[in-house]
Amino acid sequence: MAKQYYQGETFRDPDPALLQEAEFNDCTFTDCRWEDVRVRNCTFLSCTFQHCSWSGVVFSFCQMRDAWFSGCAFRSIAWGGLQGRSALVQPFGKAERCEFRYNEFSGMTFVGFDFSSCRFGDCIFDECRLAGADFRGVPLGRTQFSRCDLQKADFREATDYAIDPSANKMQGARFSFPDVVALLNGFGLKIE
């Protein structure tokens, strides 16, 4: 199957069949409702996703760079399946007013990324570069961070996070009271 190329096009709730063997450059996706869709051998370069709802989407042999998400809801997505991750190019360029439930972010780069207008629930960040990331005021809903670089990340007024200080790089990270006490949970301490 020959790869299809799309440049600067707008797709409103496209047929999931479009998500096979394609490259999208500067395209806009609006009102996409993708459930249990396998996206295969696709590249998304500087694309915008508005008011999309994805559930159980699986990426196979796909790349994403500098994607902008606005008002989207993502449920049960394993973002680490995207290829082409590097320290220089981030898969997400921006995420505003998005909700992430049961998402897994593995080995991804979000250096200096602003998550402050998003919501999380039962997500996992594993081996991610999150240095300087902004989680200020974010309801994290039991989101776990393991083996991550959280140096200078901002968690002030963020709530309900699970971070083991001994398993993450945390120098200069910012937290606020009383939620910062949750960092002591894994040490078997009794705080009265």
Image (spheres, rainbow, N blue to C red):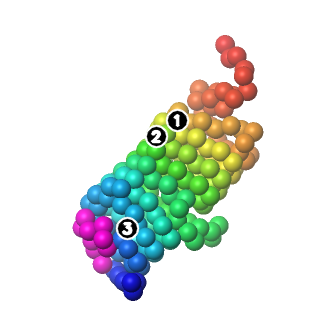
Residue lying farthest to the top in this orientation: 192
CB under 8 Å between discs 1 and 2: yes
From where the camera sits, is residue 151 visible? yes
Q: Which residues are magenta?
A: 9-18
Residue of label 3: 48
User: Marks 1 and 2, how far apart in space?
Assistant: 6 Å
User: Marks 2 and 3, how far apart in space?
Assistant: 23 Å
**Judging from the image, what secondary structure is the residue with disc 1 in?**
strand
Residue lying at 59% horizontally and 59% vertically, measured from the top left:
108
Identify the image quadrant of residue 131: bottom right
Task: Say what amino acid the circle numbered 3 marks.
Answer: Thr
Q: Which mark is residue 121?
A: 2
Give the mark, 3 or 1, whose residue is nearer the N terminus. Answer: 3
For discs 3 and 1, the disc positioned in front in the rendered view = 1
Badge 1 density bin: few <14, some 14–19, many ≥20, Cα 10 Å: some
Q: Position of residue 68 (x, y in %)?
A: 42, 64
**Judging from the image, what secondary structure is the residue with disc 2 in?**
strand
Task: Say what amino acid the circle numbered 1 marks.
Answer: Arg
Task: Say what amino acid the circle numbered 2 marks.
Answer: Gly
Residue lying at 75% horizontally and 39% vertically, measured from the top left:
166
Q: What quarter of the picture does the C terminus occupy? A: top right
Badge 3 density bin: few <14, some 14–19, many ≥20, Cα 10 Å: many
Seen in the picture, residue 178 relative to 142 is either above or below; the reply is above
In this view, the residue in front, 125 or 153, is: 125
Residue lying at 30% horizontally and 71% vertically, measured from the top left:
17
**Judging from the image, what secondary structure is the residue with disc 3 in?**
strand
Residue of label 1: 142
